[in-house]
Amino acid sequence: MKDHLFTMTPEMPGLPPEMQERMQEEMRRNFLRMKHFAEMVMTPKEPEVGPTPREEIYRKNKSRLYRYESRRTHRTPVLFVPNLGISRPYIFDLMPKGSFIEHMTQQGFDMYLLDWGVFGPEDNDLTFEDVVTRILPRMADKTLQSSGASEISVLGYCMGAPITASFLGSRPEFPVKNYVDMAGPIDFSQAGLFAKWLDAKVFDVDKYVDTLGSIPADMVKAGFKLLKPTMDLSTNLNLWWNLWNTEYVTGFNALNKWANEYQPFPGEFFRQWVKDFYQQNRLIRGDLRMGGRPVSLRNIRCPVLAVGAKEDNIAPPACVKPLIGAVGSVDREYVELAGGHISLIAGRGASVHCWPKVASWLAARS
Amino acid sequence: MADPTQQLMDMWKKQVEEGSQAWLRMLGAPQAQPLDPQAFWRPFMDQGIAAWSKVMTQGQASPDLMVQWKQFLDQWIGAWSRVLEQAMGTEAFAKTLGKQMEGFLNAASPAKKAAEQQIEGSLAGLGLPSRSQVVGLAKQVVLLEEKLEGLEDKLDAILKRLESR
């Protein structure tokens, strides 16, 4: 049917055959573009996300710990800690063949995902310190218990990296086998536009939290949209360009669903996050305390991998790389891969560059 | 009746003038001097033209105009993105943004309080719990869960000790 339609395109005398072929191809694509566009508008389908089978291991308030079982060819399981607030974690298990978690389980790693959950106004008193000293340690212990392993690898993505670094830096006794920071800011003096906009001279975080209580999802969205104002334009342009491609459209729908589900921040968490990290840069300076203990990155002595993304404007490579110089590990490596903050870990580029790198690095040490 | 091309040109010029005024206001630049929209927009235009000529000269000389058009748009958006990033990275922009936020909070705070009071009054009149009461209850549930966890931990520790005997 499809071929019949497009071979019906009238021949254009005088045009070289190659050109004629291209024009026919373009007409075919335009037809498909219109068809897919009509489908997206008239009969939008809810994309199915999170395809990898998982089991809920533990829950604490809004947070959940999920286990993604593998053949377990590697003894050491991986605890994956993403950002709190901002977005939902199903980006890491977006769709079949487009899932970091699926890739890792196929490589023989048991994966544990800490889903922080969506916090409500009743959680506005939750601080960064609470997260580091009360939620994360419990989830890490449950990972150890559930896996039966004596050590775990910890993988922090985005804000999950400073959270995990604060945990490991204040709990040197915790049995961590490997630590991976993926696009996680460590030196906040190099944290790009957000560091400039959240500077204490221009941003009164106390007033913000005292007035609003929490940071609503719409505010989070506005901040991220402002960071890259041309993003929507280029996203829509690329969508139109690839709208003929069914596979692209499926991926776009899933990613678009995720990209429009912004999440709020608990007020006190945001206050401490901005003050201690963006405004005072206390993690890298070594004067951060969590639960009465000093946080020293030197306490991290296990093998460390830091992964920066060349085009990352949320955690630019310059603020990720300093982890390597700050930890006490002998085995430490920094790699800078193609892509932005999200495309580092999701999408076709990630499956070619980042996932194999992280999997092979961990495999050699697990 | 004016020439449609001229009309379009006039419209564009007006947009440029208004756009540059807005930009300068946003960046907090002094506006004592009369604006020269042409000079203001020249860097952007130059970038666009440079991008187009790059596509035409250095890009793959494809007979497919659609591909060239897409390349051009990508470069155009890229150029804009760089310009905007530069502008947004200035201290002036950060200050303006901070001031805007403060203005918003100053306006939002009394409005929020008034709305909350009114809603709470209405709900109390209807014999329904207010938002703050529901939030308070949810907080208590969270604390209760926390206490249960503490008890669980203590029990686990006791059991472990007993097992090790």
Image: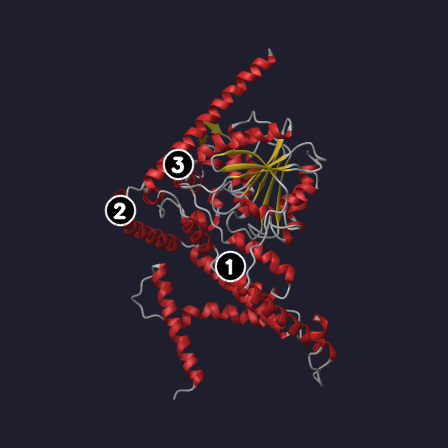
Image mark for residue A295:
none
List the residue tagged with mark 2. Answer: B122
Compared to B63, does B146 lie above or below? Answer: above
Colouring scheme applied when the structure was drawn: secondary structure
The alpha-carbon separation of the residues under discs 3 and 1 comes to: 38 Å
Asked if residue B109 is positioned above or below residue A125 in the image, the reply reads below
Residue farthest along the right direction in this orientation: A17
- Judge depth for marks 3 and 1 and give the one in front: 3
Same chain under badges 2 and 1? The reply is: no
Q: Quadrant of residue B135?
A: top left
Quadrant in the picture for the C terminus of chain B: top right
Say which quarter of the image contains residue B133. Answer: top left
**Residue at the spot of label 3:** B138
> Label 3 sits on what residue type?
Ala
Residue A170 relative to residue A13: left or right = left
Q: Residues within 10 Å of mark 2 (few under 14, many from 20)?
A: few
Q: Amino acid at mark 1?
A: Met
Marks 2 and 1, how far apart in space?
A: 43 Å
> Chain letter of disc 1?
A
In the displayed orientation, state which residue is furthest to the front.
B126
Q: Which quadrant would the N terminus of chain B be assigned to in this image?
A: bottom left
Q: Nearer the viewer, residue A56 or A105?
A: A56
Label 2 SS: helix
Q: Earlier in the sequence, mark 3 or mark 2?
A: 2
Mark 1 — residue?
Answer: A231
Query: Is A351 left or right of A128, judged from the image as shown?
Result: right
- For the residues carrying marks 2 and 1, which lies nearer the camera in this image? 2
